[in-house]
Image (cartoon, rainbow, N blue to C red):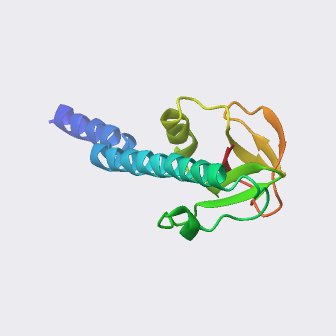
Amino acid sequence: MIYWILSAFLGLMVWMNVPPHDQAGQQLQERILSQRAAQTVSYINEINDWRYKNPSRTDGVIPDSSLGWSSVRDLHNVLQAGRVYVWQPDSPGLMSAILAQTRQSALVGRVVARRLIDSTGNDMQVTVPASIANGSLVYLN
Protein backbone atom coordinates (compact mmCIF):
# COMPACT_ATOMS: atom_id res chain seq x y z
CA MET A 1 0.00 0.00 0.00
CA ILE A 2 2.80 2.41 0.85
CA TYR A 3 4.30 1.86 -2.61
CA TRP A 4 1.04 2.95 -4.25
CA ILE A 5 0.93 6.13 -2.20
CA LEU A 6 4.61 6.84 -2.92
CA SER A 7 4.05 6.17 -6.65
CA ALA A 8 1.03 8.48 -6.74
CA PHE A 9 2.95 11.19 -4.88
CA LEU A 10 5.95 10.95 -7.24
CA GLY A 11 3.66 10.89 -10.28
CA LEU A 12 1.90 14.03 -9.06
CA MET A 13 5.22 15.81 -8.49
CA VAL A 14 6.46 14.92 -11.97
CA TRP A 15 3.15 15.94 -13.56
CA MET A 16 3.17 19.33 -11.80
CA ASN A 17 6.78 20.10 -12.83
CA VAL A 18 6.42 19.20 -16.50
CA PRO A 19 5.20 22.20 -18.48
CA PRO A 20 2.27 21.52 -20.78
CA HIS A 21 3.31 20.96 -24.36
CA ASP A 22 0.90 22.82 -26.59
CA GLN A 23 2.10 21.73 -30.01
CA ALA A 24 -0.94 23.11 -31.84
CA GLY A 25 -0.53 26.51 -30.19
CA GLN A 26 3.17 26.57 -30.98
CA GLN A 27 2.53 25.69 -34.63
CA LEU A 28 -0.10 28.44 -34.86
CA GLN A 29 2.34 30.99 -33.41
CA GLU A 30 5.01 29.92 -35.90
CA ARG A 31 2.54 30.29 -38.80
CA ILE A 32 1.55 33.76 -37.58
CA LEU A 33 5.20 34.84 -37.33
CA SER A 34 5.97 33.37 -40.75
CA GLN A 35 3.00 35.19 -42.27
CA ARG A 36 4.07 38.47 -40.65
CA ALA A 37 7.61 38.01 -41.98
CA ALA A 38 6.25 37.36 -45.50
CA GLN A 39 4.09 40.50 -45.25
CA THR A 40 7.13 42.53 -44.19
CA VAL A 41 9.18 41.30 -47.14
CA SER A 42 6.30 41.92 -49.57
CA TYR A 43 5.91 45.42 -48.14
CA ILE A 44 9.57 46.31 -48.65
CA ASN A 45 9.35 44.89 -52.20
CA GLU A 46 6.33 47.13 -52.94
CA ILE A 47 8.26 50.11 -51.59
CA ASN A 48 11.27 49.25 -53.77
CA ASP A 49 9.01 49.09 -56.83
CA TRP A 50 7.52 52.46 -55.88
CA ARG A 51 10.98 53.99 -55.42
CA TYR A 52 12.00 52.79 -58.88
CA LYS A 53 9.05 54.75 -60.31
CA ASN A 54 9.65 57.78 -58.03
CA PRO A 55 13.42 58.21 -57.81
CA SER A 56 13.30 61.90 -56.90
CA ARG A 57 11.56 61.24 -53.59
CA THR A 58 14.23 60.73 -50.91
CA ASP A 59 12.48 61.72 -47.65
CA GLY A 60 9.14 61.26 -45.93
CA VAL A 61 6.57 58.54 -45.45
CA ILE A 62 5.26 56.62 -48.44
CA PRO A 63 1.50 56.24 -48.02
CA ASP A 64 0.31 52.65 -48.32
CA SER A 65 -2.39 53.88 -50.72
CA SER A 66 0.26 54.96 -53.23
CA LEU A 67 1.76 51.48 -53.13
CA GLY A 68 -1.42 49.67 -54.09
CA TRP A 69 -1.06 47.93 -50.76
CA SER A 70 -3.70 47.32 -48.12
CA SER A 71 -2.33 48.48 -44.81
CA VAL A 72 -1.00 45.94 -42.35
CA ARG A 73 -1.41 46.89 -38.71
CA ASP A 74 1.77 48.22 -37.08
CA LEU A 75 3.88 48.02 -40.26
CA HIS A 76 5.37 51.44 -41.10
CA ASN A 77 7.91 53.03 -43.40
CA VAL A 78 9.95 56.18 -43.67
CA LEU A 79 12.41 57.44 -46.25
CA GLN A 80 15.38 59.38 -44.93
CA ALA A 81 18.27 60.50 -47.10
CA GLY A 82 17.30 57.94 -49.75
CA ARG A 83 17.15 54.98 -47.35
CA VAL A 84 13.96 53.12 -46.56
CA TYR A 85 13.25 52.00 -43.04
CA VAL A 86 10.38 49.55 -42.64
CA TRP A 87 9.63 49.01 -38.98
CA GLN A 88 7.17 47.37 -36.63
CA PRO A 89 6.92 46.56 -32.95
CA ASP A 90 9.09 43.58 -32.06
CA SER A 91 7.60 40.39 -30.69
CA PRO A 92 9.24 37.14 -29.58
CA GLY A 93 10.36 35.15 -32.59
CA LEU A 94 9.64 37.85 -35.20
CA MET A 95 13.28 38.68 -35.93
CA SER A 96 14.05 34.98 -36.46
CA ALA A 97 11.05 34.64 -38.77
CA ILE A 98 12.13 37.66 -40.85
CA LEU A 99 15.70 36.39 -40.98
CA ALA A 100 14.42 33.01 -42.20
CA GLN A 101 12.19 34.69 -44.81
CA THR A 102 15.07 36.86 -46.07
CA ARG A 103 17.70 34.10 -45.93
CA GLN A 104 19.54 35.76 -43.03
CA SER A 105 19.58 39.29 -44.45
CA ALA A 106 22.11 41.62 -42.85
CA LEU A 107 19.53 44.43 -43.24
CA VAL A 108 17.35 43.36 -40.30
CA GLY A 109 17.94 44.86 -36.86
CA ARG A 110 16.44 46.04 -33.60
CA VAL A 111 16.49 49.67 -32.45
CA VAL A 112 18.41 50.36 -29.25
CA ALA A 113 18.99 54.01 -28.31
CA ARG A 114 18.25 55.08 -31.94
CA ARG A 115 20.95 52.70 -33.24
CA LEU A 116 20.30 49.59 -35.30
CA ILE A 117 21.60 46.39 -33.69
CA ASP A 118 21.76 43.15 -35.71
CA SER A 119 20.57 39.72 -34.57
CA THR A 120 23.96 38.90 -33.02
CA GLY A 121 24.07 42.12 -30.98
CA ASN A 122 26.48 44.06 -33.20
CA ASP A 123 25.95 47.76 -33.88
CA MET A 124 25.15 48.15 -37.58
CA GLN A 125 26.49 51.73 -37.53
CA VAL A 126 23.08 53.11 -38.53
CA THR A 127 21.20 55.80 -36.62
CA VAL A 128 17.47 55.45 -37.26
CA PRO A 129 15.03 58.35 -37.73
CA ALA A 130 13.51 59.76 -34.55
CA SER A 131 10.05 58.51 -35.57
CA ILE A 132 11.12 54.88 -35.04
CA ALA A 133 10.54 53.77 -31.46
CA ASN A 134 13.17 52.10 -29.34
CA GLY A 135 12.77 48.31 -29.44
CA SER A 136 11.26 48.31 -32.93
CA LEU A 137 12.27 45.73 -35.49
CA VAL A 138 13.63 47.37 -38.66
CA TYR A 139 14.21 46.12 -42.18
CA LEU A 140 16.59 48.60 -43.78
CA ASN A 141 17.02 49.18 -47.49
Quadrant location, the N terminus: top left
* Among the 4 quarters of the image, the one containing residue 60: bottom right
Q: Residue at x 71, y 65 (%)?
A: 61
Q: Is residue 52 left or right of residue 39?
A: right
Choose between 18 and 37: the one closer to the eye: 37
Residue 47 visible within the image: yes
Q: Is residue 63 left or right of residue 79?
A: left
Is residue 136 visible in this depiction of the protein? no
User: Residue 83's spot in the image, x, y percent?
Assistant: 76, 48
Residue at x 72%, y 52% (from the top left corner): 55
- Residue in the foreground of this view, choosing between 68 and 16: 68
User: Could you tell me which residue is drawn at 79 percent across and 60 percent down?
Assistant: 59
Q: Position of residue 65 (x, y in %)?
A: 55, 70
**Residue 128 picture location, percent across and down:** 81, 51
Which residue is pictured at 49% across the width and 49% down the height? 42
Q: Quadrant of the C terminus?
A: top right
